[in-house]
Amino acid sequence: MIYLDHAATTPVPGEVADTVRDVLVHQFGNPSSQYGFGREARALVGLCRETVASALGCGVERLIFTSCGTESDNFAIRLATWQGRHTGKHIVTTAVEHSAVLEPCRQLEQEGYSVTYLKPDKNGNITAAQVAGALRGDTVLVSIMLVNNETGCVFPIREIADVLKAAGSRALLHTDAVQGFLKVPFRADTLGADFISISGHKIGAPKGVGALYLGERVKNPRPMLLGGGQENGLRSGTEATAQLAGFAKAAELRRANLGPALAHMAEVKAYALEQLLAIDGVERVGDGIAPHILAISLTGYPSANVVEDLSSQGICVSAGSACHRGKASHVYEAMDLPKKVKAGVLRVSFGPETRKSDIDALAAALKKHRDTRFPML
Ligand code: PLP
């Protein structure tokens, strides 16, 4: 199989799987238990927090573990609106966020909030000036992703933080960095965001684990889950020790080889651009600079059919975010792409393991599809 869908999820390295298994089998204690075996599990959670916090660039006291990026996004939005409840009911976000941000925003609209959805330009970019123009006195949350999961566009979070500061806004800034963590360089403590969401399974950890950074402007956060008081009282529930150990091991492995891995992905992306754009009928979609995501279109050839055809040849790419499962993506919709370009969009995404020969196979399969299938009218 040729796996070119690392933005959907990533393979779990053997070392990470071994770590997970080891915890499941040998360190299965409950971190809240008082005896030694429980204390060992508690110590393990502490070590995992240190490793992930250090990879994110923040202190351990700023990081809580969650079950996934979606939960982190939902939690951040709920926390920001709770903190701002006496200030107002306006939110600024973008039309190209992941549904883990858009759906909570839509629910808040039903609860009386007004939401400004910033539209990207035709290349998929959003500017800090757009945010400045949308801010209001009653804005309580600005939620803008760091890296778009369908175009690879990197949004200017640091600049947006400066815009909020310059405007004297009380709005809290959330960034969904699920596609940015260990893919584009940033440190949580200097990015300027008050909340940062990350997810384990995008960096080689098992599914079912994520984290949320809470900055110092977040005051008296309201718990997401009430119960035994785990995660500093903010998210009760027995810690998923094995997943946390897998998250920490995956972060450690990625971080240890970060420079070469990012350079390799950038090189593979440049090669893919060269090879794929040389195919008659293929064009680039957006100008995302993240090293691991490239959006293209086999113009006029419906992407669901292309994905299916490639899949039958053992090649995995997606027609956009994995969450859309065949529905037209709101991201490409918001970019106002011409109808036939939009119909044929494919997202190709890479990992440290991707080889240039994988791209060659994709290029050959795309040519074959173009030459053997009929385009839409
Ligand atoms: N945000 C972005 C930008 C994503 O790409 C994803 C997953 O595809 C998520 C959030 C959701 O993360 P998770 O699958 O961990 O819930």
Image (spheres, grey):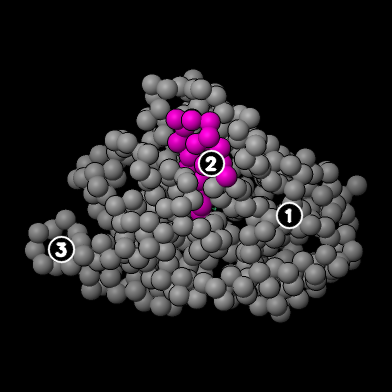
Residue at the spot of label 3? 38
Of label 3 and label 1, which has the lower sequence position? 3
Q: Residues within 10 Å of mark 2 (few under 14, many from 20)?
A: some
Residue at the spot of label 1? 287
Amino acid type for the residue under numbered disc 3: Gly
Q: Residues within 10 Å of mark 1 (few under 14, many from 20)?
A: some
Q: Secondary structure at mark 1?
A: loop
Whether the magenta-drawn stretch holds residue 170 is answered as yes
Which mark is in front, 3 or 1? 1
Q: Secondary structure at mark 3?
A: helix
Count of labels shown?
3
Of label 3 and label 2, which has the lower sequence position? 3
Q: Nearer the viewer, residue 355 or 322?
A: 355
Which mark is in front, 1 or 2? 2
Q: Nearer the viewer, residue 353 or 153?
A: 153
Expressed as whole percent of the image width and height from the top left, the position of residue 124 reads 70, 47
Residue drawn at (31%, 63%) of the image: 50
Q: Secondary structure at mark 2?
A: helix
Left or right, 319 with reference to 370: left
Q: Nearer the viewer, residue 195 or 201?
A: 195
Residue at the spot of label 2? 162
Expressed as whole percent of the image width and height from the top left, the position of residue 36 reads 10, 67
Q: Residues within 10 Å of mark 3 (few under 14, many from 20)?
A: some
Of label 1 and label 2, which has the lower sequence position? 2
Amino acid type for the residue under numbered disc 1: Asp
